[in-house]
Amino acid sequence: AQSVTQLDSQVPVFEEAPVELRCNYSSSVSVYLFWYVQYPNQGLQLLLKYLSGSTLVKGINGFEAEFNKSQTSFHLRKPSVHISDTAEYFCAFPLGNTGKLIFGQGTTLQVKP
Amino acid sequence: NAGVTQTPKFRILKIGQSMTLQCAQDMNHNYMYWYRQDPGMGLKLIYYSVGAGITDKGEVPNGYNVSRSTTEDFPLRLELAAPSQTSVYFCASSYSQGSTEAFFGQGTRLTVV
């Protein structure tokens, strides 16, 4: 079965520290992969996406992710986080040819001063 | 450019009542989706549509109905509300399947008591 697993439900980190949010996927076919961010009481917005080509993908707000086919991973990283990065982060990929998204469980990033 | 608009933002329903969650997009997207978000569970697909007049079930369709009479609108109907339908509901749209990002509304927080 195709699925997405986010390995950490909560990640507390101090401001200006680096962070990595982990995502593993299971799929028998080539995948596109996305990271979405949800700020408190808001909808989801796209942070970055991997379609093909370079395995290092850069997104908004200084985030980047690396696609690793052999590890079936797509971990999200930021070298120095800010208080405003406090949010919930979702890893996802589209299933089939209708754009239906399979989401991971979400990781809450809590940035402390 | 409003994007995806959901109404209402909040609603409390009594068990057995019915309601319609409204969703409209102004981006001329063919693909539209309804997801529900429960704590620690990520987002689950309820129903989706690939164009006006075409709808199909997602992962958790029981207790819901949809219609798509126009490209712009994709309402979600709850019949006989149950406590298990307490959730945050998100409508999303995308231009095409798979590789392009989905745009999300702000969500509707529904409580069934």
Image: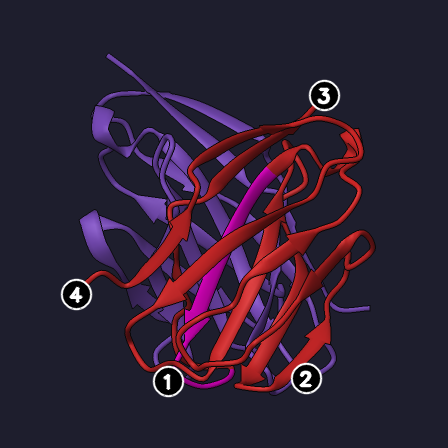
Q: Gap between marks 1 and 2, in whole Å?
A: 16 Å
B7 horizontally vs B1: left or right: right
| Cα separation between marks 4 and 2 | 36 Å
Q: Is residue A47 visible?
A: yes
Which comes before the other along the chain, label 3 or label 4? 4
Q: Which residue is mark 2?
A: A29
Chain B colour is red
Point 32% across, 67% down: residue: A57
Please tell me how crowded label 2 is: few (under 14), some (14-19), or many (20+) other residues with Cα within 10 Å: few
Residue B81: % across, % down:
76, 38
Q: Quadrant of the C terminus of chain B?
A: top right
Q: Main SS type for the magenta part? A: strand
Taking the spot 38% from the left edge, 81% from the top edge, the residue there is: B29
Magenta-drawn segment: B88-97
Chain in purple colour: A
- Mark 3 vs mark 1, CA separation in Å: 50 Å
The quadrant in which residue B45 appears is bottom right
Return the residue at label 1. Answer: A53
Labels 4 and 2 positioned on one and the same chain: no
In the picture, measured across the screen, residue B50 lies left or right of residue A45, that is: right
Chain ID of residue with mark 2: A
Callouts 3 and 1 on one subunit: no
SS at circle 4:
loop
Which is more foreground, mark 4 or mark 2?
Answer: 4
Give, as a three-letter code, the residue at label 1: Gly
Q: Are marks 4 and 1 in contact (CB under 8 Å)?
A: no
Disc 4 marks which amino acid? Asn
Q: What mark, if any, has residue B113 been given in the picture? A: 3
